Image: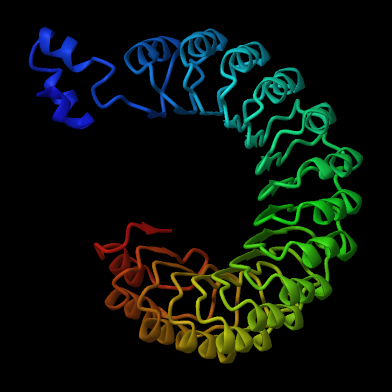
Amino acid sequence: MLSFLDRQNLCVAKRVSRAWRILASHPTLAPWKSLRFTRCSDSIIRHMIQQCPLLTRIDVLHSNEVTDAGLVILSLHGFHLRSLSFCWCDRITDAGIKSIARHCSQLTDLHLPYCHSIGDESICCIIEHCPRLSSLELTGCTLITNITLQAISIFHPHLTSLLLSTCSEIGDDAVHNVAPSLTDLKSLALSCCNIVADKAIDNIGTFCHYLRSIFIGHLNITDYGLRAITEHCTNLVSLHIPGCDKLTDNTLIGLARNCTKLVSLDACYCFLFTSVGVGSIAEKCKNIRALSLTKCVNVDDTALRALALHAHELRSLNLTSCQHVTNSGLLELISSCTNLCDLNLSYVTSITDDTIFAICHSLFHLSSLHILNCPYLSDASLCALTDSLPDLTSIHISKSTFSNDAIHILATSKKFMYLY
């Protein structure tokens, strides 16, 4: 009878009696294969692995009570583990990860973001003993150095995802040298790896032609570094280059020419980008859905008209501090890009109530609106927002000139979950 129950009903059955709990805990009955914890400890891991011997995936988030002892227990009994994720678990060290490497050779995905005690020793052990490893995330693991990349060059795991953002000890030469070993790579993150520059990124573009997502924000790179990526990575879907303030429109024009599948572009703080480059993206990348242009101070209404004409799939647009954007360009954009769900117009100080009225009239799917520090908006804008846009649940109005009464009416509207 119990064999016909799913996992949820088996949990109910376990509460009937001690005998039923023993029967319902049999490993052949709808075994748990994936578990996620926001709070965990070594004792929970011990109990979990005994009750669920067929586990293939474990995700643990923000649990400082998990130590190397828990990972040793997990490695000795978790023979079926394929995916392991420990985020912000600072008490995990190289010793625990080395035990995983020795006993869980079938591991394919290892995610250790912000585990600050993890270093090269254990990751090299993983790379050596887990030949099926395809996804490795070490974001924020500041003890990771070029030695890890050298191990990748030696053992050649078929990595499809490598996330190393804020690993500040990783250098330009090391990334350049490992690129020929990453030909299967689809996702790469090197944001805030301050030593990485043009030489490395150019070689990544030369060898990693299957890349779909690239996160290289806040690097000291120029158009030369991005040239190979824009020429060879024609399957690129998502590019994040915030803070790369030496890039010019040549990069955007190259992207538009060859990377027409682009869906998401984060170009915040790329001060040299202009409406020419953004217009090229709008014209050639018809599927663009998310575009972030914060502090792109040379972007004006010409870019918005190009988006209005070509980017009808646009869902998210961030124009924070684009001071040359005016009502005229926004009205054209709003009337055409009616699928927008997230719009940020903070510090676009020239906009007036006409823009908000147009938003209320056309953007029926809008769920998030930021109008921080827009001094020419009046209470009429808030009243319009209160009475329209059924999906709007988040609105940012700080540092604007609205009256307390208008803000109170907006705040008491039950549809708003986040008002700040």
182 with respect to 384 (left or right): right
Q: Quadrant of the C terminus?
A: bottom left
Question: Would you identify the image quadrant in which residue 395 lies?
Answer: bottom left
Coordinates of residue 205 in the picture (x, y in percent): 81, 56
Q: Nearer the viewer, residue 249 or 147?
A: 147
Residue drawn at x 84%, y 62% as measured from the top left:
228
Q: Is residue 61 above or below residue 333?
A: above
Q: Is residue 180 above or below residue 300?
A: above
Coordinates of residue 157 in the picture (x, y in percent): 71, 33
312 with respect to 144 (left or right): left
379 with respect to 413 (left or right): right
Q: Is residue 115 above or below residue 25?
A: below
Residue drawn at x 55%, y 73% as measured from the top left:
345
- Residue 11 can be seen, yes or no: yes
Residue drawn at x 60%, y 20% as measured from the top left:
105
- Residue 246 can be seen, yes or no: no
Q: Quadrant of the N terminus?
A: top left
Q: Is residue 58 above or below residue 173?
A: above
